[in-house]
Image: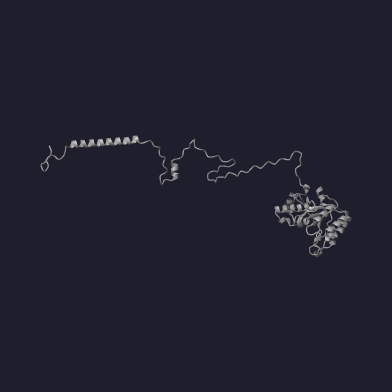
Amino acid sequence: MSRPDATGSGPTDPLPGNGRRRTAAIALVAALVLVAVVLAVLLQRPAESPEPAAGPSPGTSAATSSAASPTPSSPSATPPPPAPAGTETPEAGQTPVQPPVTVPPVPATTPPAPGTVPPQDPFPAGLRNQDLTAVPGAGNTVALTFDAGANAAGLPKILSALSAKGVAGTFFLTGNWAANNPDGVRQIVSAGHRVGNHSMTHPGFTGLSDAQIVQQVRGAEEAILAAGADPRPLFRFPFGERDARTIEAVNDLGYAAVRWSVDTLGWKGTSGGISAQIVSDRVMAALQPGEIVLMHIGSNPDDRSTLDADALPQVIDRISAAGYGFATLDALLAQ
């Protein structure tokens, strides 16, 4: 029986047991409705592709992520391209070596046909690497040689003396001299004398590069050939200036280097204290088998004397009187 309120009206609270049952029923119905709604939504949602794996979270280093998740090797992975042939794979810590530049193969040299003789020097091999100061094995003969690089003032006297005595000489011409005196070249050749190469412009050779040596020798050769003479294979260094390198360079161009046994010093002229008699005496003082005498065609630039030309008749007579004959430097090529 309920307790009356203060006013004396009916009961204010329902029975406790009945209230709890109603509340539980309402909650159960609400829950069932919610489950039904969720199931309906899930059944109607289409299947989706899985999201890609997320990268390392902010603050996580790449090294930590890599160490935590090593990439497994896969048989289907594409292998790296092979290294080019002839290269090495660098070890750890080394700088990779760049592949070499492809160079077209050099064609093989065709061997000489059977029975053929390989090219040889146009002079005896024994003359290589030398600057000859005498004609070896020449016996009692003397080679009279004349350098031409300045003017041709003494040429008429020299050619006249040689012709009168029946003697042949060797004339070393510069290319410039040959180009400026083509008639002189023809006179020398027509008289039966030998011609050699004395460079193009008469420079000292030890100060020249290899390329300049080629220019000097080939330039003179072309100029002398154009004037009607062939200087090969005789060469004389300007000023007598040479060393092992320049001698080899001249040899490689097909020339044997020829120096002299005695310089008459006639080129110094009377202004230099020389006379025709001194010229003759110097030749005789150096007389020997195979002697090579150096004389000059041009006149002294100061006094215009031509002492070698003036002394030549006496020189020939004295050499002949001593029992010697004469030869051109072609005697060298017969060794």
30 sits to left or right of 140: left
- Residue at the extreme left: 8
84 sits to left or right of 264: left
Between residue 164 and residue 311, name the one nearer to us.
Answer: 164
Looking at the rendering, which quadrant does residue 112 occupy? Answer: top right
Instruction: Give above or below for 250 relative to 81.
Output: below
Between residue 110 and residue 184, name the one nearer to us.
Answer: 184
Q: Residue at x 72, y 55 (%)?
A: 206
Looking at the rendering, which quadrant does residue 186 occupy? Answer: bottom right
Across and down, in percent, residue 55 comes to 42, 43
Across and down, in percent, residue 146 comes to 81, 56
Image quadrant where one finds the N terminus: top left
Across and down, in percent, residue 198 comes to 77, 55
4 sits to left or right of 267: left
263 sits to left or right of 17: right
- Residue at the extreme right: 321
Instruction: Give above or below for 207 relative to 27.
Output: below
For the question of whether residue 293 can be seen, the reply is no
Identify the coloring: one colour
Across and down, in percent, residue 127 comes to 78, 49
Between residue 127 and residue 13, name the one nearer to us.
Answer: 13
How many circles with numbers are drawn on the protein?
A: 0
For the question of whether residue 238 can be seen, the reply is yes
